[in-house]
Image (cartoon, rainbow, N blue to C red):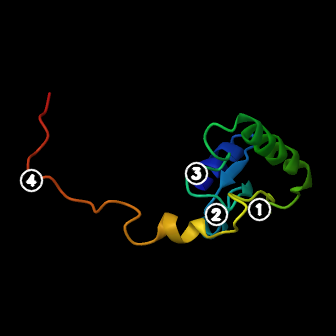
Amino acid sequence: MGLVARAVEEAGIPTLSMTSALDITQGVKPPRAVFLNFPLGHQTGKPYQPELQRRIVRDALASIDGMKEPGSIVALPYRWNDEGEEWEGSEYGPGYLPPYVRSETPAAGP
């Protein structure tokens, strides 16, 4: 998305990326980004917590004022849970994703 954000910015439209993959974001260098150390796909927080999600989005938008340099990344201070970052081991460890198996049967066409 950082590459798309740069193209949109070139068209004169400001962007803000929200990321939970800091290393990738640092490599792609979107114009502006906020980082949350949350599981991938959960940049706005846990499901069924709309108040938290709104706070995160508001804080992300408010952080734009402090981003003066292209490629700025602001880390928001939210934590996924009170136990620390132990979720990282279970989220991304072996067996996190089912193995990819290629189907030998081609999909039916139109």
Q: Earlier in the sequence, mark 4 or mark 2?
A: 2
Badge 1, how many Cα within 10 Å: few under 14, some, many 20+? many
Tag of residue 25? 2
Q: Is residue 3 placed above or below 61 in the rendered structure?
A: below
User: How many angstroms separate mark 4 from mark 3 (CA)?
Assistant: 32 Å
- Which residue occupies the extreme left position in the image? 105
Q: Which residue is at the front of the view, 106 or 58? A: 58
Of the numbered discs 3 and 2, the one sitting upstream in the chain is: 3
In the rendering, which numbered label is found on residue 1?
3
Between disc 4 and disc 1, whose residue precedes?
1
Q: Which element carries disc 2, helix, strand or loop?
A: helix
Farthest residue, direction front: 83
Mark 1 lies on residue: 73
Q: Amino acid at mark 3?
A: Met
Q: Nearer the viewer, mark 4 or mark 3?
A: 4
The CA distance from mark 4 to mark 2 is 36 Å
Percent position of residue 80, x then y: 68, 57
Three-letter code, disc 4 = Glu
